[in-house]
Structures are given as C-alpha cells and as structure tokens.
Image (tube, rainbow, N blue to C red):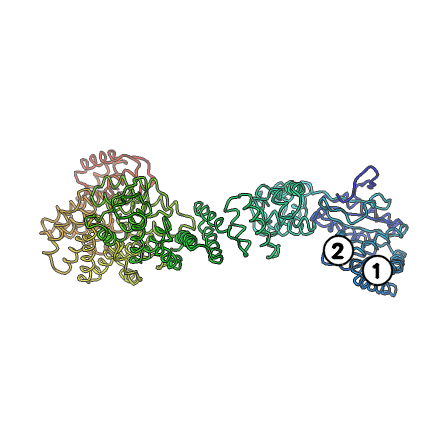
C-alpha cells in the first residue's frame, strides 16, 4: 500500500463528476477538452481532483497523491486534470522523475523552473541558486550535511519565487513518478508545501503501487494532513473496458471482445489499449483476442515502471518458465521463499502467470529480450545449476545450459546427452542436435576421455543423419580412429558402420566390422553370445553389400555359408535377417508374414533398415497393395521436420511401388519429391532408388530428354555393389533400349543378371533381367537368343508372381509365330491384371492389337487398341498411347454389330455396370472389390452374369460398353 490506512486517515468524500471552476472562469471552462479514452471509469477521480483545484483557486493549497499500479492510468489522469486546469487559467509546472536522473541532485526542480514561460529575473536567480546547490551536492556526495549551511537561503529563494507566481494565478505543480525523484528535490517540495498553506497552489504527485519490503518515498503522515488527498486507481470494470473498445473498434467488436480482453488485461488500461492494437494489426477473429507484440511491450513497460524488485521478479519468472516455483524464484533473485510466493500469487491473481510461467509467449519474449545479454546468460547459468541440483529433467536443464553460453562445467555433458535422448524420443531432432553439438564442444574443450568423446560423436551422427546424412561425413574420421583403437563399442560401432555403408565407404566398413566380430564375439558362428550389435552390422551388409558379407564369412571359416543365421528372434534386426533368408528360400507366404510382423511392430527410428528390408521383400514377392499400405503408414509417421531422411527413403520406395502398379504420374511425383528432399551427397548409395523410379517413369512416358538429364546425376561407384545398383541398371538399360542403343541396353541388363546370380538374388520379381535381355536381343535382331532366355525365365518364375509371369509371357509371345501369339498374350494379360499392373497390361493389349491387325482381324485389333489406349492414358503413358494404331481414333464410332452389343449392355443392372466398367478398364477383381466396398465373391458373381447376358469374355468388355460406362468414376460410389 502507498499509505498506511487507519481510522484517522482523511480521504475527501468523492462527489459525482462536475466542473469545479469559479464563475469568472466559465469561458475557460467551456474550452475544457474531454478526457482521453484511457480515462474511462475515472469520473469519480476526476471529480475529486477538480474539487481540489477549486479549493486551490480559493487560496487553500492542496496536495493530491494519485496512487496506482504501473499502467493503471496515473499519468493520463494527472495530465487530463492539469490540462483542464490550465485551460481554466492556471499555471502548470510539471516534471517527470526518472531512474536515470534519480542520482542527480535537484533534477526534478530543474524541470519545474527551467522553462521559457518563466523567463524573469527572479526565476533566473532561482535557477542560479539551483545550479549552485546541485554543484555543492555533487561535491558532497553522500555526505548530506555538507550542504546544510546553504540549504535555508536556497529554500527561501525558491519559496519566494513560487509565492510570487501564486499571487498572479493559481499554480499547479505536478511530479509524475515521484518515487524516482531525487532526494533534494523531494525535500524542497515538502518544505514548500508546509510554507504555502494559504496560497492558490495545487501539488499533484503520482506514485506507483509498491511491493512489500519497499515503503513510499512520501512521509507516512502526509495523508493525515488537512490539505492532502489520496486517489487510489482501481482496475477498469467490464463496462469500462467495453466503453473503451466501443471507441476504438465499434459496438460489435466491443460486444465480442470485452470479456476476453478484460480477463487478459485484468482491467489495466495500458494493457487494454495494447490488446486493441494487436487486434487491429492482425485482423483477429471476433471473440478471440491473441496477445501479440504490443501486449508484450506494454507488460514490459509496466514491469519496468514498477521498480527494481518487480523487474527482477518478472525477469526471473520469464527465465524459469514452467520451473518458476517460490523456492527457485527466491534463490535466483536472492529473496526469501515467502516473499517469492507472495509475488507469484500477485502475478497469478492478475492472470499473467500460471504454472508454466508467463501465460503469453509475447510477454515472456519481451521480458527476456529486455535483459542485457550478460545478465541473461548469468541468470540461465544460475537456473541450470539450481535445476541440476534439484534433479530436474535433463531437457529442462539443457535449455538453460544452451542459453547460458560459456563457461561450462563437466556435469553439463551428461545432462546434454540425456536431454538429446529425450528430444530424439519426442521427434525434436533439431533440438537434439543442438544439445549434442554443445556437449561435443564442451568435451573437446575439457580434454575428456577419447572414448567418451567418440560416444558423443556417434550420438551426434545419429541425430544429424535423420535430417541430413551429408552432415555426418565430417565426424567419420574421428569415429574410424576410435574404432581402430577399440574405443567404440555397441550401438556406437553400429552407427559408424551404417554411415560408412550408406556413404559407400565399404572397405573401411569391412575393417570395422571384422574388428567388432573378432574383438567382442569371436567368429561368425557367434558361439559366445547373442551379439545384437553385430547382427545389425551383418544385416546392413546382407542388404547392401552381399559380396562383402560372403567375404567376411569365408575368411573366418571355410565352411560358413554366405547367408546370415540369426540367433535372437526377438530382435527386429534378427527378424529382418530371417526375412532375408526366407526370401532366398522363395517362401512367399512366410516372407509376407515376417515382413508384415516387422512393419506392424516397428517404428521409424534409428533402426530403419528392417523396415526398408520388409518393404522391399513385399515388393519382391509382388504384394504391391500391402507394400503401398505399409509405406503410406510409415510416411504418415515421419511428417515432422526432423525426419527428412526417412521421408525421403520411404517416398522413394513409394515411387517404386507406384511403378509396379503402372501409375507413372505418381511414380514421377514421388521420385522427384524424394530427389528434391535431400542433396545427392546425402543420398549416398541410396540415390539409385529414386533415380531408377524417375528414369523408368520418364522412359515409359516418352520423355527421354528428362531421363537423360537424370542419368547425368553423379552416383557413387559403390552403388553398383548393392541391390540399389540393380534397379538403376534396369532403368538405364530401358533408357538405352528406347533410345535405339540395344547393345548398351544389353550390357546393363547382362551386368544386372551377373550380379544377381552371384549374390544369390536371382529373383525375376525383383528385377526381370532375362526379360529385359530378351527384349534387347529382339531389338538387336537376335531372336534365337531372346527365345532361349525368355523360356529359361518362364521356368524360373514362380506361379504366384503374376507380374513377372506376365512380363515373361509378353516377350515369349514376341518370339513365337504370329498365330500362337493371341493365346500367349491373353494369358499374359490375365497375369498382369491379377498383378494390378495397368501399364504392362496396356502394353500387352497394344501387342494384341498389332497381332490381330497382322492376322487381318481388324475389328478385334480396334477393340484391343481402344482398351490399350484407355489404360495407357490412365497410366500417363503418353508415348504408348500415341503408338497404338495411330490410324484408328480412340473415339471411333461403333459399328452396327457394336451398336447391338451396346444395346445389350443396357440390360445390365447398375451394380453389374459398375463392376463391368471397372473390369473393362483393366482393374482386377480385388481392386474392384476394394473400390466398391464389396467382397471379391460379389464381384465374381456380377461378372458371371455380365458375361452370360452379353455373351462375351472379360477381354471383350471394353468393346461392348459405351465410353461413358468405361470411364465411370467409382471412387466414393455406393456399395454394389
């Protein structure tokens, strides 16, 4: 409280607002301006001060003290009343005290009297006296008794000056923020008040609301004096805020915003104005004001005008944030816990602070930004030490360590490391990298143990790889050195190995792996233990560099098989290794079961290899729908910014999946997105995956120029030692084939086959290199070799791999006599429709059209051409669409026979037409069932009735259904 309240305290009864000016001053009164907008809810206070001015006009000197919190409108009230009095003929001598001048003797008096309108001889003499006294006070310093002898004459001179002014007119002397007044000015003011009891003089002081432990600068007995009056400003009421909003924003906004703005501002006029400014500047929605920069700066001004202790409290609360307990707050600013608790309660009552610190981010930011950098860092360091001593969460302590800057202490390293683990678990990779970089820096500066530094570097590599694999390259030399010297174990050794393999540094990786195996686990047989770290390393080798896994095995034991025999089936990596073994055994059912188990239980984290392995295995066994579902699920889980590498990897795999479906547009979109999300250097040997998808799509669409540009992208030589290189060679070979360079294509396809056989990965469903080679031989005119190779392929391909069989049968048809081709192509089409590959189905239909044309069956040729072109257009295969019987328009009118068939189609039910239209468009029964939300059995029943009614088979459906039915869009259709 500003003054001590008690029974004897005299406060004048405040009457309703009126103009307390004498009749002789009515003309001046008419010129009185209306109070400013911030004076809403201040009518009683204005009335009381005007009454004091009336008393002063009648030679009864008065003192008014306006008491309120910072931002409550003390200055606005003072100026409004003083301006009104000046308009009524009074002389207003005003000063504003400030902390910057608090140490300057007589600074306030200097403001009061050193003004142009008082340029008289007496005033000049008084100013000379002030200058002399100020100089004496400065020489005396803190020894106030040094100027006591000259004080009395100076006071008499100033009294004489002020008395003379009051003889001419009523005088108002105001001091705003009197709590900042210098001591000498304050003493002089109080002296003059006591000597001018019967003069037309009104003195107005404004003083802030002060916190406990700090008393008013004015005498405690001042309110008890007859001439004194106290005005205490209260917060604005809801009605007052509504009036203010009405003036600034209009009636509708005032009605919508009044309640939330009153709650946010706690009725403080300054904060209300700031919220209005934020609302006007940002076009906020009615009823939802959001505190912005103006509000933050307004709170900051209020804090800074509330005194040093309040400012320290606010700064400590801003720094502590959610840790702002009374105990910690007291320790930070060196006050007792009880006082800190009281201060927090005051802040909380006003709605500015809750259990997380300042409620509004704009306020916290404004206050923190106002702290000088050195002081701010010192506060963060102190808070970090206190939180660490109390056992707070590592992430909480780490944020203050980061903000504190140097110097650092050894305990900070482990805290930052633990905090990075927490950040990674929450997906905040950027913050984890920040923590680990500082920990690494501290460790290097303190000459920590090399093994500890290597472990920290490994953790940093782990975090950086998630965002940008290229950023990890600079750390690899230190980790390689640590591995050679035996200071890198467990997951840190695995991290090094995966980075080396990712970036194609295979020889170094093999050396590291051999060291891990022999130093910790003995031999490849793992007789001593179940080495999960080594399992991880071997799985990376198995998936990326089969030649080198075989080499390590043969060095250790002559009779060791090149396949990896895992021991710990509970490990995700072990399951992936089992999956690879099942792939080699061509056990598709087990492959699907194992792959989906890995995908079901796994999450995109540092162990991304098993997930990629599982997806690739699903692709290889032609479970494309399942692969697409799981890939989309993984992509939804890696949307945060700190998972850029995973996003790129899974997006590239999605492009491969789209390519297997024949969706060239989506293939191109996903492949280009993957390539654009990371630099070529970051991709390492994996760059072949998105490049292969994009090049294949460009070739299929006929855009050979873009395909050529993509193939100019630099790729690491080590990529061709990995299965990724197989996809790249396959795509590049088809580019050469379509560019008329059959022998270059043959070279790529044969190298692909050589590697697949050597690696025991000869899976036609992965890369059909024999089919590719046969096509190249046909282009080169070697039909005999083409036939031999394709027949060999047909014997190897599994009956369950419909896409691989369909591709093989299509080429087999090309090496058989013309009359034998329709049957083979019909079988190929059935296989490809089962596989769901619309692009290859379109190619088979195009081949069928050409064969029928050669056989003279022009109607059948036209029907196949229409179907082929329709599918090609749906796939985005413009080049194929243009090549299909260009002399027969896709929209050719139906013949008479066709018209009769179309008429029969009218007999179909709506459900039958939906199913038939999708079947005619090349969709499989499974796809039709999924699109129409029915069972496969229902689809089969509908098709059976369609075939019976129309007397056609599935291949003839497009020729008997009107184009409008064939183009039917069924997404979102009702169930059949």
N-terminal of the pair, mark 1 or mark 2, is 2
Q: Which residue is mark 1?
A: 146
- Please tell me how crowded label 1 is: few (under 14), some (14-19), or many (20+) other residues with Cα within 10 Å: some
Is residue 518 found left or right of 3 in the rendered image?
left
- Please tell me how crowded label 2 is: few (under 14), some (14-19), or many (20+) other residues with Cα within 10 Å: some
Where the C terminus falls, by quadrant? Answer: top left
Please provide percent x and percent y for residue 824. 13, 47
| Local SS, label 1 | helix
Gap between marks 1 and 2 measured at Cα: 24 Å
| Local SS, label 2 | loop
Residue 357 is tagged as none
Q: Is residue 37 visible?
A: yes
| Most foreground residue, 824 or 495 | 495
Quadrant of the rendered image containing residue 188: bottom right
Please provide percent x and percent y for residue 601. 34, 40
Q: Which residue is mark 2?
A: 97
Q: Residue at x 40, y 50 (%)?
A: 643
Is residue 429 found left or right of 590 in the rendered image?
right
Q: Is residue 921 visible?
A: no
Is residue 410 found left or right of 69 in the rendered image?
left
């Amino acid at each position: 409280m500003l003054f001590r309240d008690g029974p004897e305290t005299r406060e004048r009864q405040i009457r309703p607002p009126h103009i307390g000016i004498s009749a002789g001053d009515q003309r001046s009164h008419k010129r009185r301006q209306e109070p400013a907008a911030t004076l809403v809810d201040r009518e009683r206070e204005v009335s009381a001060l005007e009454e004091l001015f009336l008393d002063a006009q009648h030679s009864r000197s008065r003192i008014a003290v306006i008491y309120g919190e910072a931002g409550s409108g003390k200055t606005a009230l003072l100026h409004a009343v003083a301006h009104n009095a000046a308009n009524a003929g009074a002389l207003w001598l005003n000063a504003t005290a400030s902390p910057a001048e608090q140490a300057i003797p007589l600074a306030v008096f200097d403001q009061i009297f050193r003004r142009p309108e008082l340029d008289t001889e007496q005033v000049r003499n008084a100013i000379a006296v002030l200058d002399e006294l100020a100089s004496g006070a400065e020489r005396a310093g803190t020894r106030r008794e040094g100027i006591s002898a000259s004080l009395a004459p100076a006071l008499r001179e100033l009294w004489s000056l002020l008395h003379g002014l009051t003889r001419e007119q009523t005088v108002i002397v105001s001091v705003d923020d009197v709590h900042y007044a210098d001591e000498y000015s304050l003493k002089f003011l109080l002296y003059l008040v006591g000597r001018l009891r019967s003069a037309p003089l009104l003195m107005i002081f404004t003083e802030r609301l002060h916190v406990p432990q700090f008393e008013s600068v004015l005498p405690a007995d001042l309110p008890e004096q007859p001439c004194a009056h106290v005005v205490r400003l209260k917060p604005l009421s809801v009605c007052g805020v509504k009036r203010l909003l009405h003036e600034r924003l209009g009636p509708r906004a005032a009605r919508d915003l009044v309640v939330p703005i009153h709650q946010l501002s706690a009725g403080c006029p300054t904060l209300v104005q700031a919220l209005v400014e934020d609302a006007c500047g940002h076009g906020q929605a009615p009823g939802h004001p959001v505190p912005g920069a103006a509000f933050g700066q307004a709170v900051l001004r209020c804090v800074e005008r509330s005194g040093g202790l309040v400012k320290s409290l606010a700064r400590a609360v801003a720094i502590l944030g959610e840790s702002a307990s009374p105990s910690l707050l007291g320790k930070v600013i060196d006050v007792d816990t009880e006082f800190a608790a009281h201060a927090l309660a005051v802040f909380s009552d006003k709605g500015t602070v809750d259990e997380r610190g300042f409620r509004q981010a704009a306020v916290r930011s404004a206050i923190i930004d106002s702290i000088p950098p050195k002081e701010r860092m010192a506060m963060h360091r102190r808070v970090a030490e206190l939180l660490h001593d109390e056992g707070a969460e590592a992430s909480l302590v780490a944020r203050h360590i980061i903000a504190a800057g140097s110097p650092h202490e050894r305990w900070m390293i482990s805290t930052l490391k633990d905090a990075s683990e927490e950040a990674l678990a929450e997906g905040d990779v950027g913050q984890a990298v920040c923590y680990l970089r500082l920990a690494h820096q501290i460790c290097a500066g303190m000459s920590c143990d090399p093994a500890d530094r290597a472990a920290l570097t490994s953790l940093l590599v782990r975090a950086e790889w998630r965002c940008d694999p290229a950023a990890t390259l600079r750390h690899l030399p230190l980790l390689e050195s640590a591995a050679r010297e035996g200071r890198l174990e467990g997951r840190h050794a695995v991290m090094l190995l995966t980075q080396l393999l990712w970036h194609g540094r295979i020889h170094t990786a093999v050396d590291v792996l051999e060291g891990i195996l022999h130093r910790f686990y003995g031999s490849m047989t793992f007789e001593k233990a179940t080495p999960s770290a080594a399992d991880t390393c071997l799985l990376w080798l198995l998936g990326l560099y089969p030649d080198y896994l075989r080499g390590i095995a043969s060095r250790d034991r002559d009779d060791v098989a090149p396949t990896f025999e895992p021991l710990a089936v509970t490990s995700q990596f072990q399951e992936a290794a089992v999956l690879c073994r099942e792939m080699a055994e061509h056990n598709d059912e087990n492959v699907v079961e194992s792959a989906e188990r890995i995908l079901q239980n796994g999450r995109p984290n540092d162990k991304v290899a098993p997930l990629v392995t599982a997806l690739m295995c699903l692709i290889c066994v032609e479970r494309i729908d399942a692969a697409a579902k799981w890939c989309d699920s993984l992509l939804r889980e890696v949307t945060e910014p700190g998972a850029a590498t995973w996003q790129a990897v899974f997006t590239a795999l999605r492009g491969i999946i789209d390519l297997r479906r024949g969706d060239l547009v989506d293939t191109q979109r996903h492949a280009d997105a993957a390539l654009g999300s990371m630099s070529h250097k970051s991709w390492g040997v994996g760059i072949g995956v998105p490049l292969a998808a994009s090049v294949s799509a460009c070739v299929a669409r006929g855009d050979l120029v873009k395909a050529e540009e993509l193939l100019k992208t630099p790729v690491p030589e080590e990529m061709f030692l990995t299965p990724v290189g197989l996809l790249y060679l396959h795509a590049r070979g088809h580019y050469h084939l379509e560019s008329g360079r059959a022998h270059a294509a043959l070279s790529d396809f044969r190298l692909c086959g050589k590697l697949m056989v050597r690696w025991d990965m000869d899976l036609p469903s992965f890369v059909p290199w024999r089919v590719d080679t046969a096509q190249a031989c046909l282009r080169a005119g070697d039909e005999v070799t083409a036939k031999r190779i394709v027949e060999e392929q047909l014997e190897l391909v599994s009956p369950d791999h419909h896409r691989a069989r369909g591709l093989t049968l299509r080429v087999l048809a090309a090496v058989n006599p013309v009359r034998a081709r329709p049957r083979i192509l019909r079988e190929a089409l059935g296989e490809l429709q089962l596989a769901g590959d619309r692009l290859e189905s379109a190619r088979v239909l195009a081949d069928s059209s050409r064969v029928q044309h050669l056989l003279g069956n022009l109607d059948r040729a036209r029907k196949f051409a229409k179907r082929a072109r329709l599918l090609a257009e749906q796939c985005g295969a413009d080049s194929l669409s243009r090549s299909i019987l260009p002399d027969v328009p896709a929209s050719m009118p139906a013949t008479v026979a066709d018209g009769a068939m179309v008429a029969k189609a009218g007999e179909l039910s709506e459900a039958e037409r939906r199913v038939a239209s999708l079947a005619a468009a090349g969709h499989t029964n499974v796809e039709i069932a999924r699109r129409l939300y029915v069972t496969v059995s229902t689809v089969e029943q509908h098709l059976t009735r369609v075939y019976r009614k129309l007397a056609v088979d599935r291949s003839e459906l497009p020729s008997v259904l009107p184009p409008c039915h064939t183009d039917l869009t069924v997404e979102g259709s009702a169930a059949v």
